[in-house]
Amino acid sequence: MTAPVTAALPLAAATAAGYHDGLAAGLRAVFDPARPVPCSRFGYTLLPAGYAARVGRWALAGGAALADRAHWSVRPHSAAAAEGLELIQVAVTGPPDPGPAPPAGYALLLAAVRVGLTHRMLDLAVTHLATRHSDGNPLTSRQLVQAAIAGAASTIELCRDGLTAAADRPGHAGWLHARLDRADAEVTDMFGAAGYLTDHPVRCLPVVALVRNAWAAPPAHAGREEEGT
Amino acid sequence: MTLDAAATRVRDEVREHADDLRSRALAVDTDPERLTPHLDAPAVQAVHRLSMPGPDGRPRRCLELVAGLLEAARGDPGVALACPGPSVAGAVVELLADPAQRDRFYAALAGGRSWAFCGITEPAVGSDALRMHTRLRPDGTGGYLADGAKRYIGNAARGTVGVVFARTGPAPLSIRAVLVAAPVAGLTAASLPTLGLRGAGVGELRLAEVPVGPEAVLGRHLPSVRGGIWGAIRAFDTMRVQVGALAVGTAQAVCDEVRHHLPAGRRRHRLAATQARLDGARQLIYRAAAEVDAGRGRGQLASVAKLEGVTLARRLTTRLPELLGPGALLDHPLLEKWRRDAQGFEFMEGTGSIQRLHIAQTYLRRPRDGAAA
């Protein structure tokens, strides 16, 4: 029996790295030189600082390109840099890769990192909310706040199991990202205006949204803003 | 609802400048403190004129303001907020200032090269104005000395005039609004690094024995119940509709940009549904503004306008770029920027949770015989 291509994916390690050490550490934990790095239509992607030189293959709009047939450069991006990432622009310099591209799998791996990262930010948010008061009571005693906490916590647990369920079907990670997008927005709001400052820890969530945008192809219902997922 | 002639004129004038505002968006986002090269642009001057009293000296109606702001944000919300003008402080001045104070305030802003700040939010209590700590204590000569701190204030570091809310005692009615000109001894300001809406110049103010003359206390000519915190609450109604307009304008900008880059026929039917939703939100903003102008309601519709406008903007700035394929936020910097900008609307003039509470409370208080339906 052939093992699923993703059976050995380091999902738990990615989640743990995302929780304990942050976005860049999570991406370093899932990086695999043999796995093509997804890029945008114009050849942009995000990687942990210093990792572009280790990429073996780029997944570009026109097909995969071996590293020795592409040129890459680091572009300025302050938000990415603050999270230990680099914005990379890739341009093909040689003929296209003649072989079939192996399955990327990064969408699922990124979802695993995100579960840890969202969980960490929720823990920070709860600590923050407990120190803020309204009418003499901590904000964590408010039903609206408790509902938001419950929503994010439920998403984290659902996605934790969803990772395992999707491990054999890495092309079906879109729903995980859609749920995590929504949870990230809820968690970010818990910090109030403080979470809108670039020196706040929750700044990692807008950056991970950019990584998700490049690494995890949008689901089939992309753009249907009325979609509730 | 249909815009009247005056609001239509304002909308059309600002709409003509939307492309120019958009052309400045990334420059302002990258270096929000370097605004001088933009200040003389006809587009920036048009937004400045919109924010000031009309040619007859009377204040702009909320409907005119939102009709123009929505188009300015369709150009770019960051540049719209970077344009010189009275901003939130203008709404407070219109409600609380006497004629001499109003003249002094607008004179400081004439010419289109200066900004105003409005200090309500504080580090410890956020926008819960009733619990603010900043205080005014008598200076012994009929005036006051102001002490305290304000945070997340638009135009904080670049404002040359502004309004600061502070309390003379513990009771809610002891909260007063005062005019402050900057620079002044004891007032220090600094910018804060925000994720988006960088053109808004969000920052913090610190007041240490800032002298406030009796002539600077707003609302002296009004009954005490309408002299202080009442002004902040009413100003919030106006500003919430304006934030809703900025949000809907931003959502429209994203829709325009995605339509521009989307190959013909590809998923365009989805944009048609999105446009219908945007048109509905625009109508809601207009109706809420008309209600503010008429002095109707308890601000419920203003809260609805803000809540729905911001929700739509956050949703569309997240989802619509996906129509352009993976990495669209990296390929199209404006789309990435508007996504950051839309998140910032959440924290202006009360969060979504605050709006929900307000909407529920006013709904629960209204008659339930169906007459209001």
Image (cartoon, coloured by chain):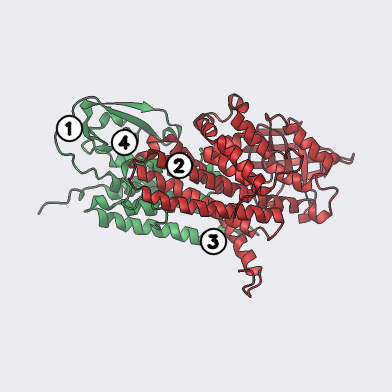
> Which residue is denoted by mark 4 in the rendering?
A41
Image disc number at residue B177: none
Q: Are marks 1 and 4 in contact (CB under 8 Å)?
A: no
Q: Residue furthest bottom?
A: B369
Image disc number at residue A97: 1
Q: Is residue B126 visible?
A: no
Q: Chain of mark 3?
A: A
Q: Is residue B150 left or right of residue B338?
A: right
**Chain green in the figure, letter:** A
Nearer to us of marks 3 and 4 is 4
Identity of the amino acid at label 2?
Asp
Q: Chain of mark 2?
A: B
User: Mark 2 and mark 3, same subunit?
Assistant: no
Which residue sits at x=54%, y=36%?
Answer: B18
Image disc number at residue B256: 2
Nearer to us of marks 2 and 1 is 2
Q: Secondary structure at mark 1?
A: loop
Q: Chain of mark 1?
A: A
Give B83 or B8, whichever is nearer the viewer: B8
Q: Is residue A112 visible?
A: yes
* Hue used for the chain lettered B: red
Structural distance between the alpha carbons of marks 1 and 4: 17 Å
